[in-house]
Image (cartoon, rainbow, N blue to C red):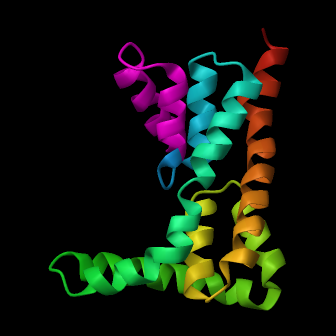
Amino acid sequence: MTENIADFFVTVFRDKIPGELIIFIISLFPILELRGGLIAASLLKIDFVTAFIICYFGNILPIPFILLFIRKIFQLLRDKKGFSKIIEKLEIRSIRKSKRMKKANAWGLLAFVAIPLPGTGGWTGALIAALLDMRIRRSFPIIALGVLIAGVIMSIPTYIIPSFFR
């Protein structure tokens, strides 16, 4: 799914905006995050180091804002028509995932963010940390490290393995 969405963005924006901006924007989005950015960077043939740095910072840029403001945003939107069900779904999903993480705490959050699977990543990790009332000074470095590890893992199928077949 991530590959298809990243490919869509590349196809739509390839000739309209610079590739570096495309991968930065993709990396900002939930679900796509750094994984989608690296896939798009590979499709755009952007140098690995440049792509990794852009995607990493694109992925972690929203994290402090999520940690600081998501609960307040949820409170404001909860009473708005159409948003209450979305917020409820997000909270239930995050709380379900956070139950396992509560026991492992920092290590659980790190593993959750670092393992690049659908539904994991910096955005969901930040949402879980916020719902668990983890302090930003503690949770942000853990999430940033998890995104870095996920980036290293995703570099293998997007840049390293394909380079063997060129």
The picture places residue 71, in percent across and down from the top left corner, at: 44, 83
The picture places residue 153, in percent across and down from the top left corner, at: 79, 45
Near-viewer residue (30 or 74): 74
Near-viewer residue (159 or 25): 25
In the rendered image of this protein, does residue 56 appear above or below residue 129? above
Q: Quadrant of residue 35?
A: top right
Q: Tell me if residue 119 can be seen.
A: no
Q: Residue at x 49, y 29 (%)?
A: 21
Per the picture, the main secondary structure of the magenta-coloured stretch is helix
Count up the numbered dots: 0
- Which residue is outermost to the top? 166
In the rendered image of this protein, does residue 38 appear above or below residue 136? above
Q: Quadrant of the C terminus?
A: top right
Q: Residue at x 62, y 54 (%)?
A: 60
Q: Tell me if residue 122 can be seen.
A: yes
Which portion, as a residue range, is magenta? 1-27
Magenta stretch: residue 113 in it?
A: no
In the rendered image of this protein, does residue 91 appear above or below residue 67? below
The picture places residue 96, in percent across and down from the top left corner, at: 57, 85
Q: Residue at x 50, y 79 (%)?
A: 93
The picture places residue 120, in percent across and down from the top left corner, at: 62, 63
Magenta stretch: residue 10 in it?
A: yes
Q: Residue at x 76, y 66 (%)?
A: 141
| For residue 17, side relative to residue 58 (left or right) | left
